[in-house]
Image (cartoon, grey):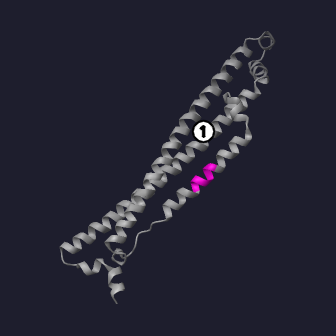
Amino acid sequence: MDIQEEILQKDSGEKELNEKDVLVREIAGYMKNVSLLENPLLVGIDGLNSQLAIIQGNRDRMSEILSDAIWEKSQAEIQLSNAKFVYDQKYSINLLKEEVLSLKNVAQQKAKASETILKEIMGVLEAENILLRVDAFCKICQNAIANIDSKYNSLSKQINNIERGLANGIYNKEDLLPQMKSNCK
């Protein structure tokens, strides 16, 4: 299937958009499923480590999604380049036709040369739109990764603060095991 046929198939574009909608919802979930606690001692070290593991899992999945999106973007760039090449070739050929050259006005010549290549013009426009959508999706992924990384760093800082608090005697080991305290009561 050549580029124009693929671009002009409306159903495949709609299917792709629906798949992206699902991924955007998945990404939004990753950005929301772990939040920082005002008092990290409430979940203890095990709870904090569990949150770190969840965040790392989210980061790993986001890296996978972004890698796929980068590949899709490169494919969209290739499609756009191919569509422009086909357009440019046909347009150049049309400009050399006698019926076009006989027109006195340059604007008329350009218009006449473009008349028979509307499919190619639409192919270029659709390829540009696909590239814009894929590029926007890449940016959504990059934003989500930055958000996830920020949460990971903040949670790591909370753990470091707790470790310093232990070393300085601000906290004791019992403060870090709230689940055990509540189970023993």
Q: Nearer the viewer, residue 89 or 58?
A: 58
Instruction: Tell me what residue is drawn at x 70 percent, y 45 percent.
Output: 14
Instruction: Name the chief secondary structure element in magenta.
Output: helix
**Extreme bottom residue here?**
185
Q: Is residue 144 above or below residue 66?
A: below
Q: Is residue 15 left or right of residue 150?
A: right
Q: Secondary structure at mark 1?
A: helix
Looking at the rendering, the stretch of residues picked out in magenta corresponds to: 19-24
Give the residue at the far left of this rendering.
Answer: 168
Quadrant of the drawing holding the C terminus: bottom left
Q: Residues within 10 Å of mark 1 (few under 14, many from 20)?
A: many
Per the image, the residue denoted by label 1 is: 131
The x and y percentages for residue 130 are: 63, 39
| Percent x, y of residue 163 | 24, 70
Residue 75 quadrant: top right
Q: Residue furthest front?
A: 184
In the image, residue 174 sits, relative to residue 107, either above or below, namely: below
